[in-house]
Image (cartoon, helix red, strand yellow):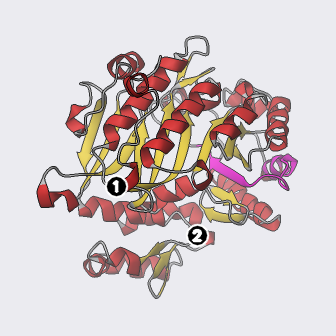
């Protein structure tokens, strides 16, 4: 099913495109695909395990119509990245993926060659035949959810692929013409020694990969793992093993040429994720799709108020049927409040205090930390530093934070304590 815009005009309109190219702040677009083959017990992202019941075309139409309706309400922006997350976006029919990408590029007046376009994939649904279609659409990054190369660990994590399928998918992705391929892994699993963790990473085709994301297993409260952990029925690795594995992975991946540029992320030179970097640097991102989060600067209506910004965070409904039904017909109003009833599940206006706190919360996860001079152009940094002086001095004396001129960062040996450091600082 095509959107009203496509039916009426034969091709989508360039809404505001001539006023956007080369102007505005960088912006990322996140597109959430809610379906997967099976729900993993540790995952707290919204997803529905149902491969057969995917509404490929109708869901794409709904996402496109949401894009058109939201675009008119945000401040002019220059498209930096498109990121398909989920769920399992590699399950989405590649024709519909291409259709969505085309619409996003048109709306923002962007060329696919200048935009980072990432698609998350799982080995269980990876089909190499799709790669050429993805590449043609503009996809230039694949992120493959390997998670582990140990079959027992994969069973513990509830994954539906085994280590052989993971390696086959990785090699197939690398043989495609898509420029960058990354792998996600989870460490700190029960029954696995530090040497096991390093050994698994060495089995990856590291010389060909452009990116590795390495996450410690996190137990989220409203997941099957969270429920089992509360009742003492979930086997977990000791904290010391998690810390030692984190340090060993850092040493191994940096040894072979990866840059550890964020607590959980490693990249080859010039291969950092531009989309995720946008999150850590506090850039706006437009969320589209069921359960998608977004943080955007809205236009104000009328006269001189056009230059003012109202910073808004929102989350879309998790009801797939409601989302598709409300947006499938589509229209192009420019007011945020014109979105169909029930699409936005929650929203909040972000004030300067919250915005500044989040810049530190996310920026301190990165190798570079935060640039105080840059932040001073947007916030009252002097007042913030004064209010946190005791905490800063205490953390510095313990080696958990460093300040050099206008740069504030957490030194690597203390990254594994970053959550506590940031909490104490804020």
Q: Position of residue 82 (x, y in %)?
A: 53, 45
**Residue neighbourhood size for the residue with mark 2, other residues' Cα within 10 Å, grouped as few (<14), some (14–19), many (≥20):** some
Q: Residue at x 27, y 45 (%)?
A: 73
Separation (CA) of disc 2 from disc 1? 30 Å
Farthest left residue?
303
* Residue that numbered label 1 is attached to: 76
What is the x, y in percent for residue 362? 45, 60
Foreground residue among 121 and 203? 121
In magenta, the rendered stretch is 196-217
Give the mark nearest the N terminus, 2 or 1: 1
Can residue 173 be seen here? The reply is yes
Which element is circle 2 on?
A: loop
Q: Residue at x 37, y 32 (%)?
A: 66
The answer, for residue 219, to whether it is visible in the render is no
Compare residues 414 and 161 and report the one nearer the observer.
161
Residue in the foreground of this view, choosing between 320 and 359: 320
Residue 367 numbered tag: 2
Q: Horizontal and vertical percent for residue 258?
A: 75, 63
Name the residue at 71% across, 23% down: 160
């Amino acid at each position: 099913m095509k959107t009203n815009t496509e039916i009426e005009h034969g091709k989508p309109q360039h809404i505001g495109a001539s006023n956007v190219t080369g102007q505005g702040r960088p912006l990322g677009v996140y597109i959430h695909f809610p379906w997967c083959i099976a729900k993993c017990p540790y995952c707290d992202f919204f997803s529905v395990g149902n491969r057969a019941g995917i509404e490929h075309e109708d869901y794409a139409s709904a996402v496109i119509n949401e894009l058109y309706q939201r675009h008119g309400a945000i401040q002019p922006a220059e498209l930096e990245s498109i990121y398909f997350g989920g769920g399992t976006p590699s399950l989405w029919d590649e024709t519909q993926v291409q259709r969505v990408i085309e619409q996003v590029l048109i709306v923002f007046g962007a060329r696919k060659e200048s935009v980072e376009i990432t698609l998350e994939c799982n080995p269980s649904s990876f089909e190499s035949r799709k790669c050429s279609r993805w590449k043609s659409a503009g996809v230039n990054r694949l992120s493959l959810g390997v998670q582990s190369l140990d079959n027992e660990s994969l069973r513990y994590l509830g994954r539906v692929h085994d280590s052989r399928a993971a390696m086959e998918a990785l090699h197939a992705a690398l043989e495609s013409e898509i420029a960058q391929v990354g792998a996600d892994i989870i460490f700190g699993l029960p029954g696995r020694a530090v040497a096991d963790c390093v050994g698994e990473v060495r089995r990856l085709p590291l010389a060909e990969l452009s990116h590795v994301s390495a996450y410690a297993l996190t137990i989220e409260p409203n997941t099957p793992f969270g429920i089992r952990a509360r009742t003492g029925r979930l086997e977990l690795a000791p904290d010391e093993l998690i810390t030692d594995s984190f340090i060993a992975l850092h040493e191994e991946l940096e040894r072979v040429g990866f840059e550890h540029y964020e607590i959980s992320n490693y990249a080859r030179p010039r291969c950092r994720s531009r989309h995720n970097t946008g999150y850590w640097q506090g850039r706006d991102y437009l969320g589209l799709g069921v359960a998608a989060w977004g943080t955007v600067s809205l236009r104000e209506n009328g006269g001189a108020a056009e230059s003012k910004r109202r910073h808004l965070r929102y989350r879309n409904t998790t009801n797939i049927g409601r989302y598709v039904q409300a947006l499938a017909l589509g229209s192009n109003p420019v007011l945020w409040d014109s979105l169909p009833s029930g699409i936005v599940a929650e929203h909040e206006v972000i004030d300067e205090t919250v915005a500044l706190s989040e810049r530190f919360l996310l920026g301190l996860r990165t190798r570079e930390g935060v640039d105080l001079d840059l932040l001073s152009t947007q916030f009252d940094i002097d007042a913030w530093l004064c209010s946190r002086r005791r905490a800063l001095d205490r953390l510095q004396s313990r080696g958990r934070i460093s300040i050099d001129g206008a740069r504030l960062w957490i030194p690597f040996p203390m990254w594994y304590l970053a959550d506590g450091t940031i909490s104490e600082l804020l």
